[in-house]
Every structure is written in structure tokens, then in C-alpha cells.
Amino acid sequence: MTLDALLSALGPQVVQPGHAADRSYLTDWALREAVAPLAVLRPSSTREVAQALEICLAHEVPVVPQGGRTGMVGGAAPLADGVVICLDRMDATPEIDVAARTARVQAGVTLSALQRAAQAQGLMFPVDLGARNACQIGGMISTNVRGMRAFRDGAMRENVLGIEAVLPDGLVLNAMNGTFKNNMGYDLKQLFIGAEGTLGVVTGAVLQLRPVSPARVTALLRVRDLTDAQSVLEVLQSRLRGLSICEVMWPDYYHFACGFRGFDPLPVNGCADGLTLLIEAEGVEETPMRVALQAALELLFDKEWITDGAISQTSRQTEEFWALREAHEGIPQAFASVASFNVSLPVEGGDAAISGLIAALGEAFPPLRCLWFGHLGDMKLQLGVVNVSGSPIGAEDVIRIKDIVLSGVQEAGGSLVVEQGGETVDYVPRRIRSEAEHALNRSLRRVFDPKGIMNPGRLF
Amino acid sequence: MTLDALLSALGPQVVQPGHAADRSYLTDWALREAVAPLAVLRPSSTREVAQALEICLAHEVPVVPQGGRTGMVGGAAPLADGVVICLDRMDATPEIDVAARTARVQAGVTLSALQRAAQAQGLMFPVDLGARNACQIGGMISTNVRGMRAFRDGAMRENVLGIEAVLPDGLVLNAMNGTFKNNMGYDLKQLFIGAEGTLGVVTGAVLQLRPVSPARVTALLRVRDLTDAQSVLEVLQSRLRGLSICEVMWPDYYHFACGFRGFDPLPVNGCADGLTLLIEAEGVEETPMRVALQAALELLFDKEWITDGAISQTSRQTEEFWALREAHEGIPQAFASVASFNVSLPVEGGDAAISGLIAALGEAFPPLRCLWFGHLGDMKLQLGVVNVSGSPIGAEDVIRIKDIVLSGVQEAGGSLVVEQGGETVDYVPRRIRSEAEHALNRSLRRVFDPKGIMNPGRLF
């Protein structure tokens, strides 16, 4: 009945029955089991999104908005009794305003399409991540992606100037005013950033661009531990004004990445269990940046804060360094993935928390390996817990694993988003948020979505 | 009755009857007419704030939270039938976490106290404004102050990591988790940023600090118009990586400032009606920055984008340059101020909008002068409309003036916050926001404050 109503309003180009839809819409990068929803909707305009939502609201059918489905925590996985609204047809070429340094984009534009459009005007969008060819702006907003430059240029939140979103009742909320300050009323767009599609469907945005830096230098460094890594970051930040990337990889991740890619630019010498940093600085001229980086690394060797290091000499080498950091895309193929976590840890105590977790999980489940990697600058890390044995891990054990990670992160004063293997998605926020904060969140959600049709069960 | 309840719960140290309170609590920097509220409360702890709010809610008495009262648009002016909660006793020395580069502060800490505490550790808080000795962190959050470095380092919103706030029912909302990403639920603290005290009382915050730059160079430049000013900004941003300040002053403001301070570093030569820019770059070493600035200015002279300019040679001169930009604190004393506006304009068309407004107001009311100044990078400007004649301007004419400004800004695609002279405060947002957005704002406000006691009539 819902399907008929959707079909007659929007036509077969927009509405596909779930069982007939391309399989790619039914799963995500975590390769979870495909779930066929009632329908997959691919609207081509804000108006069609509004029509679709009105019909879903009238039938009280759950709606899951989908971007590029590159998430690893299941926020865009279909629900069997709901419809999926995929934004991939709303991908008009971004409008770049060179004077204002802004881009006006539809939600379905991929990050790499935005990057190309900006670059053609000598500009760049500072939020960058490995999934750039597939992830879409709407999904990046709904998950408040940080990306690798966030410690310098901010996450999505800091780079979104305006949003257009459609509420469940079909109301189009236009907060696209691209000026920088709009203090009249609450900043509603802030609620949509990171809302995981629970308040409505983000259909467009005005984004902040920055000038492209013509030169960059890249290096791979080996450090003993997180404390030394932080010292290295501090030295590099004060010595290289344009430091824009500082990624960290723990040994188990690094070794997986080298195996997956088939090369190792820093073969172990003396610090087998050290961390590997990928750093990059951007600026106007390459030569003085190389000189400054060389000098900084000499200082760091002298202080014994780094034990090994290589400055990239060719663009090929730069690509190789990056390929290691982005090898995480190979994890789901390489292992039976047990669970994957987005973890924020405080700088102080982060090291102990990570070693503690590796030890605790290794003790409880010897066939597990913890692949830790992420952004050093803001300690926003990813943890892939993988099963290196042949035998599967039972659902109860998965819950125990999740509990161990949650407790460890919580004790360290951090926060996390967790995804449980299989089809159940669980963000377990309640153990960290207070009951009062949770109640407020529920009330806010009801303001936008009184019937609870938007991505139910997700976020909280 | 309310007063008795407050007195018996909190004592005379916290509770002063409005008529007996120091006059400074009854007005603000716009020097509006003093209004005595029922009581002025000066709690010394979050717990006392919660107690006070519970009592006010029980008696359904309006509450106006007050920071340093440096606002020019009346958001913290007392209401005769309400109480004022002033945070000035919650001013414990900020706790600086050097490793994490964060400061944990109480809401009543002044910006300059925070700056001193950060500087002692080699760090700085990037949001800076002229009112730094008086304005308080809580007020800066509640108004989402941008300050002068915002085009590079962001406004308050981009530099607040966590917030503690008390809701009208006394509930303490603790979102002080100082880690950088907390995607569990909506980012509630975002609603408090810029809420003007309408959702609750902000009592504390965790703020992002940055390393201090050891060197800076400052210059005053004269440009023909806003288009040239934008070209100058573009050149300086690409030539000086550390450009951190770019303020703009229109002629009427600049001449007032020179008269008020008693000096003029750029006596007019050939461009009497040009704009004056105050620019500053920060970096590691002064000499190369001076060389780069000198070279950039030569290029700008060649291109005729600047008509005059002076690089500060001494710290005394730097102070003088800054004193001009900060001379706006003298406006209320120097003139009968008619109205003051915070205006955001798009880069494109901003010039025409400003000239149009100056002409329209001058035509409608010859004794008016428009003092325009503000941040060039994000076109966040202030407009002081002052009366240079001896004869007063009637209330009806003030409304006409406000309407002229509002229409001009709206036509240009900008936004504004406006304050009407006298005791009435009016943010006139409805003409710019859509009805639907307004309704959502009202619903959100009710989630936090169902009885409507928090700063009623303010914000919207």
C-alpha cells in the first residue's frame, strides 16, 4: 500500500521495490548482511524528497536516509519494514562562489566531485577522508565526519555554513543563508549535523572552502608511544606552520596495511611495537618547507622522540604513504570483522587506555586482534576488532567484547560510537550520557519527528 | 514573595533587592535606561544557580542571565518583573590543560582573565574582542561572539568543546566532556551557543586553546572600496600564511575614532572617502614576516588596490592602531546613539548595500551619521546609527530607521540583530526567518523552558 502510494506519486524512476533494488543499496562498507526494505527511493529533487516523506509519514513507515553508505557503524543500513531514501541522484555540479569561497551543493554530491569542482577554482574543501569517491555531502553532514585535517580546519560542523533539510511532514527547512553569522533564533542546522538522519533528510548545503596550498611535504615517522607522538606533534606544529595532517597507526594496523599493500617504507629497526605517524604540511613553497621539516626531524631524532622516519621524495612515494593509512578499506575483506568503533580519547591517559584495551581483549579472546588507527591531533581514533582465527565468535561474546571496549573508553573519559556485527545496530549511548540528557534528546527528536519515522532505533 | 523565597534559600550575599543593587547591574554598554528588577542574584556555584532557577520556576518569575553586560543589543537588560542572575562571582581561576590545549572555566570569568591564564602557559584563546576586560565567557557563549580572529580561527561556536548549563527546572546539564567528538545524541551544547540565555543559564565551559605565536606585524591600510578591500584580503591571505586580523572601518567611523583618540596615523591623501583596514599577521619569526608584508604591500600599491598604508614600527604604534579599531567603546558617550546593529552581509553586493543604506538614512534623516566597522574576513559588521544634531529623534522615526536598515540588509541577502533605543528590545527576526523555522524555534525553546521564564521576549 505504501509502495503503491509512493509509485503513483513519484513513478518507477524514483521508486524501486526493495527486492528489485540494486544490492549496493541494501548494505554498506562494513559489508553487513543485505536487508531488503519495502522500497528504495531515489528522488532527484528536494520536492520529491518532501513528497516521499509526506507519504511515509501518512503511512507511518520508517525512513532510512542514505548517503554513500561508506559508514562502518550501520547508520544507513535499510530496515526491512521501512523505505530507504537515497540521495545519489541529487548530485548536480556544485556551484562555487570564488569571492565568498563557498560551495552550494546538493546532498548526493560525492566528496571527490566537490573536491574537483573546488580545485578547478583554486579552492579546496578541508574535510577529507579515504572514502572520498563514494561518500556524499549529506551523509558527511549527518555523521559530522571529522576527516584528517580536522585538528587544524575543523570537522564538518565547522565547515558547513548552511543546510537545506526536509522534515518528516514534508516541510523544507531552508537554512542555506551562506553568510557567516545568523544569530536569529537557534542555529537549527547544528542539530542536523551529526543527527544521522533522525530529524529529517538533509538535501543540500552551503560549504566553506579554503585556498589550495600549492606545495606539500609528506613523511612517515616511527615513535615509541603516544606520549612521544604528542611531543612530536607539538614540535611539528610549532616548527611547521602549515601542518595539516597527523595520522597515527598502531603496530597491528600498520603491519596489516603493509601486508595488504605489499610494501613497508619503514621496515622495523629497533622499535617493533612503536607507532607510525603519517604527517603532511601544506604551504606556498616546497623547498623551505622541506628544509624546515628536515630540521624538525633532526631535532626529534636528537631528543629520541622518533626512532625512524622517511620524508617522501616523489609523488609516487607520497601515494604509497597514503595507501597505508587508507588500507583500512581492506579490513572487511581480509578478516572476519567482529566490531568496529569510532573512539574519542582524551590526550592524557589515552595511551594507557589503548594498551589496557588491547591487553584485556587479548586475554579474554586470544584470536582477536585490535587494529587501532586515526587522527592524532584530536585523538579521534578507529578501532577495528577482528577475528584472526578460523572459528566464529558467538553473539554473546561480541556483546562482552563491546562491553570491554565501552568500559575502557568510559573509564578513560572518552566517548564512542559502536557497531555490533551482524544486522543489529547499537550505539549504546545511555551508559555515557546522563538520563536527563537522554530525555532532552528524545524531546528534541519529537519536535522534528513526532511520529518517530526517521531512522528509528538509530543514534539513540 | 519571590524575593523572600530567594532570600531564605540563598541568603543576602547572593540575593539583593533590585532597588538596592549596584546600578551597573541595571544597564549595559549601550547605556540604556536603568531598569530595577525584583532582585539581582549573584550565585557563587552551579548549585546556587540551580536553586535560584527552581524558585523562579515555582513562582513563574522571568529570569535574565547576565554576563559582563557589554552587549549593545539589550539581551541582558533587566526586566522589571523578573530577576537578574549575574554570573560575576563564578570566576575561579581557569584550569589550563597544557597537553590537551584546553581551559576549563566558570561562566563569570572575564575574557582577559582567561587570556592571562592561557598566556602563562604559552597558549591563547583565539576569540578576542575589545570588551575583553569586562565580557564574560558565559555571555560570549550565549551570544556566540565572533571576535576579530573568527575568519581564521572561528567564532565561539568553533572554540567551545563543552558546556555546563542549568535548565529552568534546576537540572544541571553537563556536556563538559572535553574530547573533540561526541556524536552520541544531538550536540545539545550547540543550542546554548547563541541562545541569549533563553534555554537556561550557562555556568561553565571547556574551551579550545591554541599555541601563542611569538611574533606579529600590524599595519593600517587605506583602500578605495570594499571590492578592493576584498582583493587586498585575498592577496594578504595567500602571501602571509599567518594573517589573523583584518578589520575594516568606514570613513565616518574612522574620523570619529581619530577624533576620539586624538591622532590619525593615515592623514588623508587622495582618498578621503576610502576604507581603512587594520591587519595583523602572527608567526614564529618577525623579520621574515615584515619582509613578506612589505613585499605584499608593494604589490598592492602597484595594483592600486591600496592608496596609503603604514606598517607599525613600535609596540606603541601597534597600540595606537588598535586603539582606533576599539574606539567604538566611545560612541555612546560621544553621541546620542539612535540604534546599533550587528549586520552580516554577503561579500558580493555588500558594498552597494552599505552605500545604499548610508544614502537612504542620510536622505530620510539628515542629522544621522552611520558608523560602520567590523570584520572584513567574514563581513560581520557593526553599524552604529548616531544623531549628530542637538534635537532628539522621536520613537516613530527610530522605527523607520530600523525598517530602512532591515530592508537594506534583507535585500542584500544578509542578516542582522537590531536594538531599538530606549528600553524596548526587539530582534525582529520574523521578517527574515520563515514562519516554519520560527515555529520550530518556539517548539525547541519549550522543550527546555516549558513555562517560558528564561529571558522572555528576547531572541524571538
Image (cartoon, coloured by chain):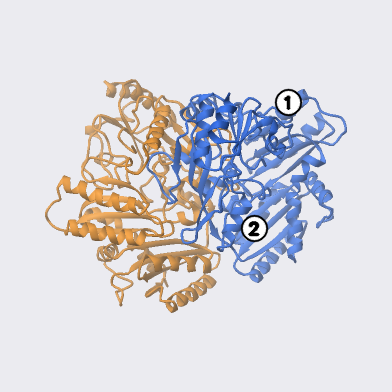
Chain colours: A orange, B blue
Please report the residue visible at 41 percent of the width from the left and 39 percent of the height from the top.
B186
Question: Marks 2/1: CA distance?
Answer: 41 Å
Q: Position of residue B197 (x, y in %)?
A: 56, 35
Callout 1: few (<14), some (14-19), or many (20+) C-alpha neighbours within 10 Å?
A: some
The chain that hosts pointer 1 is B
- Locate the C terminus of chain A and report the quarter of the image it occupies: top left
Q: As shown in the figure, which amino acid type bears the numbered disc 2?
A: Val
Q: Is residue A204 visible?
A: no
Q: Quadrant of residue A75?
A: top left
C-beta proximity under 8 Å, tags 2 and 1: no
Above or below: residue A256 compared with residue A69: below
Q: Which residue is mark 2?
A: B235
Classify mark 2: helix, strand or loop.
helix
Vertical side of A226 occupied by A345: above or below:
above
Residue neighbourhood size for the residue with mark 2, other residues' Cα within 10 Å, grouped as few (<14), some (14–19), many (≥20): some
The answer to whether residue A261 is seen in the rendering is: yes
**Type of amino acid at the residue the image marks with label 1:** Ile
**Which one is in front, B444 or A58?**
B444
Q: How many marks?
A: 2
Is residue A355 or residue A159 the one in the foreground? A355
Q: Position of residue B300 (x, y in %)?
A: 71, 59
User: Which quadrant of the view contains residue A456?
Assistant: top left
**With B157 as the anchor, is A345 left or right in this view?**
left
Closest to the observer: A358 or A382? A358
**Mark number, residue B399:** 1
The disc, 2 or 1, on the residue closer to the chain's N-terminal end is 2
Where in the figure is residue A457, as x and y percent of width and height? 30, 34
